[in-house]
Image (cartoon, rainbow, N blue to C red):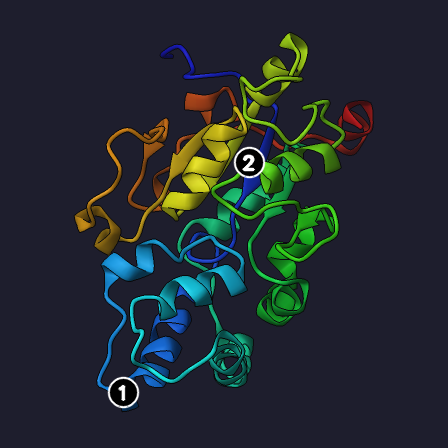
Amino acid sequence: MATPRAKIEYVIFDMDGLMIDSERVYTDVTNDILAPYGATMTWDIKAGLMGKPERAAAAHLLSFFPDIPLTVDAYLAQRTALQDARWPHVQLLPGAARLAAHLAAHRVPLAIATGSTRRNYARKTAHLARVFGLFGGRVVCGDDAGAGRGKPFPDTYLAAARGLGRAVGPSAEGDGEGVGVAERAERGRGLVFEDAVPGVQAGKRAGMHVVWVPDANLLGVEHDPTAAQPDQVLRSLEDFVPEEWGLPPYDAPRLRVHERARCV
């Protein structure tokens, strides 16, 4: 077997557009709101919104349409009403359930780091408890007290790692002041799954390895060539090969109960 890219000990997932097909809802709802003004959100605009906290994303969106008489609050009120009707029907994306269940079965520490508010997280996942229950409540949302700055800053991913008991140090860049050698090494044992460019930057700035699973439309959007690049790009979570990252392969036998106890 080929040498693994890294020896991963914990995994952190983004949610929107990676695990669930919520980005489609965001796009449809936003364009429904913009349509009366003759405007449309293109993928060039959307790329800059993905992964950001909702108010920051709304302000960024409206900055492209200065002639539209909508405040951030008015836009968010319309968006919330339209989205709330759709969240109970949002579906998992291919590969998400299998990967989360596989890692959980092998006692790999798992967490979620999302820019979604806690309120919206609950609405998006209530009907998908068989998958999101695997994370055991280890979820950092964009409006949580300890979430810090939103993506592309590293804070959310570092908060999620700390929630797993990992000694990753303060919310500073991976090679920033105050981050010790041992803390950098601990960050490097983490693997992040992301679909958004700001999220990729957040994971890399946290000093973690990042697998980017972008919407195909994102690949045609121009990105900052000087920004940190993901460690791997996949078409879908279905294409992820765990053993490439030192994780148990899909055909590995699950741990028995007494073996799991020794891993805790």
Q: In this rendering, does residue 251 appear at all? A: no
Task: Say whether disc 2 or disc 1 marks the residue closer to the N-terminus.
Answer: 1
Nearer the observer: mark 2 or 1; the answer is 1
- Please tell me whether mark 2 sits on a helix, a strand or a loop: loop
For the point 24% across and 75% down, the residue is 40
Q: Nearer the viewer, residue 18 or 72?
A: 72
Give the residue furthest to the bottom: 36
224 or 199: nearer the viewer: 224
Front residue of 69/160: it is 69
Element at label 1: helix
Q: Quadrant of residue 48?
A: bottom left
Tell me which residue sits at (35%, 71%) in the image.
Answer: 27
Residue 61 location (% of width, % of height): 37, 66
Image quadrant containing the N terminus: top left
Q: Quadrant of residue 261?
A: top right
For the residue marked with disc 1, what is the amino acid? Tyr
Work out how far the residue at label 2 is from the one at label 1, CA to CA, in angstroms: 36 Å
Counting from the top left corner in percent of width and height, residue 180 is at 66, 12
Identify the residue position indicated by label 1 in the image: 37
Instruction: Specify whether residue 3 is in view.
Output: yes
Q: Quadrant of the C terminus?
A: top right
Q: Residue at x 17, y 49 (%)?
A: 220
**Can you identify the residue that label 2 sits on?**
154
The residue depicted at 57 percent of the width and 52 percent of the height is 114
